[in-house]
Amino acid sequence: MTVLYEINTVVWLGELSVRHGRRVTLGDVPGEAWDEIAVPGVDTVWLMGVWQRSPAGLRIALRDEGLLTSFREALPDLTDADIVGSPYCVRDYVVDAALGGPDGLAAARVQLALRGLRLILDHVPNHVAPDHPWLTAHPDRLIQGTADDLARAPGDFVEAADRVYARGRDPFFPPWPDVVQLNAFSDGLRAATVDTLVAIGDQADGVRCDMAMLLMNDVFAKTWGDRAGPVPAEDFWPYVLPRVRERHPDLLFVAEAYWDLEWSLQQQGFDHCYDKRLHDRLVHEDADSVRAHLRADLAYQRGLVRFLENHDEPRAAATLPGARGRAAAVTVATLPGATLWHEGQFEGRRVRPPVFLARRPREPVDEPARDFHRRLLPAAVAVRRGEWRPLAPTGWPDNDTCRNLLAWTWTHPDARHLVVVNQSDRPAQARLPLPWGDLRGHDHRLTDLLTSQSYDRAGDELTDPGLFVALEAWQAHVFEVG
């Protein structure tokens, strides 16, 4: 199962440059730095933000007081040199020369492959920078406006390349000020998207598609109406993805997705889609809510990306501090589907730097958090094999704290595992009848892979009435059942 590790490439290379006293690019990263990335339990690295950023977009960002305020909040000693523009305001899908250019990326991919790691890169299908070549050469690929539109709603439209274009947006928020909107109904844009993704596939093993649901026919039609033209008979991704896979059949496609459209995007060809619902339930809701989410069809769950943070979300150490964060990490690490970890998450970083910045504040390493994740990730690799099955903890008439427990098993021909998580701020007890019928008549040793503690239990008890578990607030067990 895919385990992703997201790295803010500009920030990472900047910190390596300071550490080594020289400018470090993707082509000359020291071997020990690649070794640090090769975290046991991770198989895919997402180098976020490698494409050419837009000078025009940067100028817009530097005039945006709201953005500047957010920059100073994240980095109190901010300087102009720290602001490099958004990696999602793409000037062109060519690796930025400041990061080492295409040759540097090719060298980085080799180094990752030597360590058994795949590489994925970004694609932003909904919008481009206001100085992207298409505005001049292929205006038909974008949503256009008129001088009257610009005069009436200057926040929604922008003049560029002697034309008026709509600013990029999703339907629930004001437009993004630094990008222009592509037209998902344009035949030319669809063909160009195939070419762009094929080119990315020449350089990487996978693609993370930004805000992928915005390009779906029904979403795009509701957002742009008549400005987009007639709705095509074929949806955007079913047109694009098969044509890319003709050239790159094994290319991994990951969709940033919201609004409960994950299943639809899976059906349209994506391997994995963000599981924002699980993130929100772990942060804001209780075990019953999480358990309900995990009743979904298993095929659907295998196509989800479980995460506690990424570059768009607050840091997990800030929203889920201490033991609560560890419990949530056990949950996302041991469920079916892909898992996404964010560089700095293991060390307990609390500040999420805006993606416009090339530098982040120094923060002390949370050594207990780092030690915990060093145990969790290899444990998750051992656990997530074979058949996954959720369990229903049972309680007693005078003790219903079993409702606060999440539990599941993984069954493989050569291994059996049990995961139990107390998703609450109070102690919880339960019986967990284990699903393996051949446990009876023997004693069995349960070894917690997170602590190395072992417990011997009779097989008859494990089957009926079930393993007795008593967990303190936010505690978890990851048992290997011998």
Image (tube, rainbow, N blue to C red):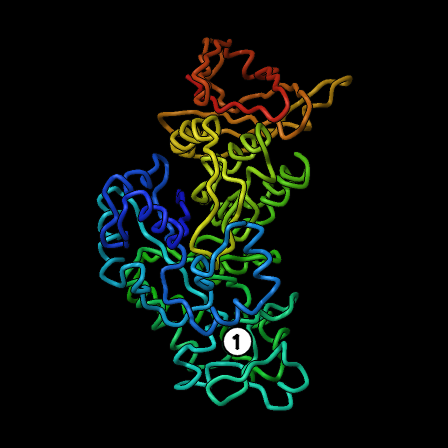
Horizontal side of 35 relative to 293 (left or right) equals left
Q: Which residue is denoted by mark 1 in the rendering?
A: 181
Q: Nearer the viewer, residue 371 or 233?
A: 371
**Residue at coordinates 63% horizontally, 37% vertically from top-left?**
291
Q: Quadrant of residue 156?
A: bottom right
Q: Quadrant of residue 426?
A: top right
Helix, strand or loop at label 1? It is strand
Q: Quadrant of the N terminus?
A: top left
Dot 1: few (<14), some (14–19), or many (≥20) neighbours within 10 Å?
many
Looking at the image, which residue sits at the far right? 398
**Residue at coordinates 62% horizontally, 43% vertically from top-left?**
293
Image coordinates of residue 420 in percent, x first then y, are 55, 26
Q: Is residue 458 above or below residue 51?
A: above
Horizontal side of 36 relative to 62 (left or right) equals left
**Residue at coordinates 26% horizontally, 52% vertically from top-left?**
108
The amino acid sitting under disc 1 is: Gln
Horizontal side of 77 relative to 191 (left or right) equals right
Q: Quadrant of the C terminus?
A: top left
Image coordinates of residue 295 in percent, x first then y, are 60, 41
